[in-house]
Amino acid sequence: MTDTTTTEQFLDGLLDALSLEQKVRLLTGASFWTLHEEPQVGLGTIVVSDGPAGIRGQLWDERDASANLPSPTALAASWDVDRVHRLGQLIAAEARRKGVGVALGPTVNIQRSPRGGRHFEAYSEDPWLSGVVGTAFVKGVQSCGVAATPKHYVANDSETDRMTVDVHVDERTLREVYLAPFERMVVEGGAWLVMSSYNSVNGVTMTENDLLRSPLKDEWGFDGVVVSDWGGVRDTVAAARSAQDLAMPGPQGVWGAALVEAVRAGQVDEAHVDEKVRRILRLAGRLGALDGVEAATPLAEPWPQERIDALLREAAADGMVLVRNEGGLLPVAADGTTVAVLGQHARVARSQGGGSATVFPQHVVTPLDGIADVFGAQNVRFAPGVRSSESVLPLDARVSTDPATGEGGVHVRFLDAEGGILLDEHRMGGRLAWLGDPVLGSTAVIEVTGTFTAPEDGEYAVGFAGLGLFRFEVDGELKSDGLFFPEGTDPFMAFLNPPKQSFPLALRAGQTVSLRLEHRPQVQPELAAVMFTVGYEEPFADQEAELHRAVELAADADVAVVVVGTTETLESEGFDRTGLRLPDGQDDLVRRVVAANPRTVVVVNSGGPVVLPWLEKAPAVLLTWFPGQEMGAAIADVLTGAAEPGGRIPTTWAADEEDVPVWQVEPVDGALFYDEKLNVGYREWLRRQALGGPAPAIPFGHGLGYTSWTIGEPELDGLALRVPVTNTGDRAGKQVVQVYLSRVSESAVERPVLWLAGYAVVRSEPGTTTVATVEIEPRSLQYWSVDDHAWRTEPGTYAVHVGASVATLGDPLEFTV
């Protein structure tokens, strides 16, 4: 059945066949990751999974590996919607391989303040770019029979008090900045779901907010499902009367029997229930999960690993932003070149941020391994330089053995109150989490055991990081027993970034110790979740001695590569960053290495902006974001020129924390005010610069390549812009021609100094001139009128600005509307 009218009539019949109780049951999840089936009408189970940077599936662990994509900010940095579309298709293939029908992504909230803890998971500070890239992702996912879920609708742009914060934002700003990406993904992308956020907007929590009805459903024509963020539906009647459709997770929740009673009491019209069920049935039909309805698009087949690795390696390199390259230091010839690789980030790959976007890849290529593979292990030397900022490194098969099975990893047992074994399992690592697992409801103790083997002589530490009641033993000796909960800490923040307990051990290479950890979970039935890590800390000598060793290696090498950055415990869902500085010691490491070797490349491995106080002194600086599982191979490709560093930065990076225009992410008396209005990101930087304020360290849109370009005079025909672009260098390369608009004649409404209105990605050979075409959308000239609540085009004179970044634009071309 493919005819829309026929399908809707078919859905009418299914609704008529269901009792009120059956219909209400479908409005709450069946479990943490599944929706209810209903055999009476041929409705099958639908499985959902987190999915902005990979599909994890129903297990939060390594036993069902997932492709780990570059972070969404890295995808936006590529400005390449065709590749983003292919990555969306990969997400769909991974989803179908795991039996998943709904990918909970993309995240398209605006990077309003660089302190936002979850910004690695979103695309950009610019609403137009966020919408364009997000729409390509949505189309890619849904072209292969899996539903995409743009989230979090709306104004969930920071993490502090995200469950309760009331965001105050004016109507025009809401429309032009925060709703705009969602509008594009619904109207152009045809998204099948949208996730409502935890926060309130202008006094009303989003699962009850009128914004779910209008503009989302009434104005934009969204006919899909509004799913809540997990635990976001809190009021039976208010949420049922709203356009919120599905409450997750389940089976507990505020609807169920309480909603049935509310309908029968006349508090909620049954028509509200019917509308929600219809949308869920329509979704099921699109996914091929409803008998009698043909899936909307062909279902994806799994990809071979080689195809996955190749695309992820290519995507990671194309999103990397080369910020500096003095004297053409890069690319570096690999033949015989000796390389000092420095920094803990080179050995412990930071491929992704923290929180619900986490996946467990089959492998991760570290920067050290990627560089050694290309330059030759005999030509590469490593030193950490500074102590790792990691809490504890999870035990893994290299250093730990399961004492029950003899395999690499650890052994886990779930015990009831009498000590009976409910479940025991082998796990390959010490990073452990269970979300919604039924066994948690009967579990009194989770026991983890492992035999740790020292890889080399040194002073180690072993321990754990977790929240709650723990007991830890080393070779049978009790080391810790008690409740671990940081006083004054937000519980969700502490859950995702828990305190550590570690205990020093002097060990010889090959020496073993037995580790045993007991955790007594205190789970809530409606949101059963346990997460902790059993791990270790590597030997580390005196700080000054380690730093001196790194500098010596740098001085003796042809090229030094310093890898610095943040971690998934510093950039994560659940909390915002307190500042933008790199962890202690990393800036000093960079300064010392740059002083020792004038051929130093600094690789910055962070999901969002950080302050780089040594930027103007570093010969070459490469931003990699959190680049996914192929990060080390992609870094090596860029260093050697096997791949172009194709990124152009989608966020503005400040030279100093004091320069950041929008710093505030903490609510005051429960409210967060978006007082900057339209001027988010580069818009506010430009406004302040016009008043004598500081310039950013890295302007929006900036990025270098390995060839040179000339951007010619643009020609405008109506709203079609043609720009000649010439590769004037000696090798093939990539350029991103960016188009901004401004208002020239006096305007009756406030306008940003400049706003992005289009771009073109140009890839060409040396000496080639390509004519880039950019169609400026009529909406780019419009503003949202709060007088008549509609989009309006103000007559007058505008200017088109074309260049390679917001800071390197040619002479404006004026036109009149």
Image: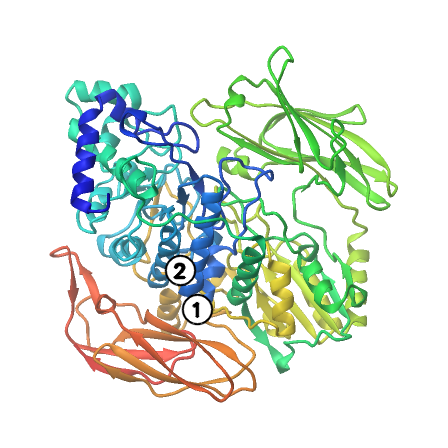
- In this picture, residue 529 sits left or right of residue 744: right
What residue sits right under mark 2 in the picture?
125
**N-term-proximal mark, 1 vs 2:** 2
Question: Where the N terminus falls, by quadrant?
Answer: top left
Secondary structure of the residue carrying numbered label 2? loop
Gap between marks 1 and 2, in whole Å? 9 Å
Q: Residues within 10 Å of mark 2 (few under 14, many from 20)?
A: many
Question: Where the C terminus falls, by quadrant?
Answer: bottom left
Residue closest to the eye, 541 or 417? 417
Residue 785 image offset from top left, x and y in percent? 16, 59
Establish if 545 lies above or below 406: below
The answer to whether residue 691 is seen in the rendering is no
Residue closest to the eye, 55 or 350? 55
- In this picture, residue 456 sits left or right of residue 97: right
Quadrant for residue 419, please give it.
Answer: top right
Residue 127 image offset from top left, x and y in percent? 34, 60
Q: Residue at x 28, y 19 (%)?
A: 257
Q: The disc labelled 2 sits on which kind of residue?
A: Glu
- In this picture, residue 562 sits left or right of residue 361: right
- Count of marks, rendered view: 2
Please report contact status of discs 1 and 2: CB closer than 8 Å, yes or no.
yes
Quadrant for residue 635, please give it.
Answer: bottom right
Q: The disc labelled 1 sits on which kind of residue?
A: Phe
What residue sits right under mark 1 in the picture?
700
Q: Residue at x 26, y 83 (%)?
A: 716
